[in-house]
Amino acid sequence: MNDVVLLGKALSDPTRVRILYALLQSDLCVCEMVDALEMGQSTLSSHLQTIRQAGVVETSRRHKMVSYALTAEARPLIETIIASNRSALEADRRIARDQVRVQERIQLRKNDVCVLGPGQLDRSEDTKK
């Protein structure tokens, strides 16, 4: 029963839902999520800890960065939950903005690995102007 309660806790906060939605697109390191979701690292880390305790995400180290990904076991469940609520989630402006920013941040990777720290997305947008 504890696993169900922890999953409910992981899904009971809009910020955590945004994180899970972003991780459906790709595994992401903390700095990519900080940029894409436009939140502070300490806030993000706190939410990631709750999600990790639920067993929904796992970490791996790529070079100097720690990357987060949905676990193989949790991915189908999260996909189903998201799919059954897709219209409501996609109507949320934050989710829409997050998805665009996740893709923009992924484009900054080198050899499919984040090699930049946080704050790079907005800097790259400034160079486009």
Image (tube, grey):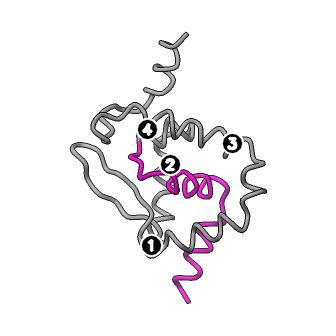
Q: Quadrant of the C terminus?
A: top right
**Mark 3: secondary structure:** helix
- Disc 3 marks a residue whose amino acid type is Arg
- Disc 4 marks a residue whose amino acid type is Ile
Magenta stretch contains residue 31: no
**Mark 2: secondary structure:** helix
Residue 82 in the figure: left or right of residue 93: left
Looking at this rendering, what residue extends furthest in the left direction? 63
- Disc 1 marks a residue whose amino acid type is Gly
Residue 28 in the figure: left or right of residue 10: left
**Mark 1: secondary structure:** loop
State which mark lies toward you, 3 or 4: 4
> Which residue carries the number 1 mark?
55
Q: CA distance from mark 1 to mark 4?
A: 24 Å
Q: Is residue 65 above or below residue 19?
A: above
Looking at this rendering, what residue extends furthest in the top direction? 129
**Mark 4: secondary structure:** helix
Q: Which residues are magenta?
A: 1-30
> Which residue carries the number 2 mark?
44
Number of numbered discs: 4
Among the two numbered marks 3 and 4 on one chain, the one whose residue lies closer to the N terminus:
3
Label 2: how many residues lie within 10 Å, few (<14), some (14-19) or many (20+)?
some
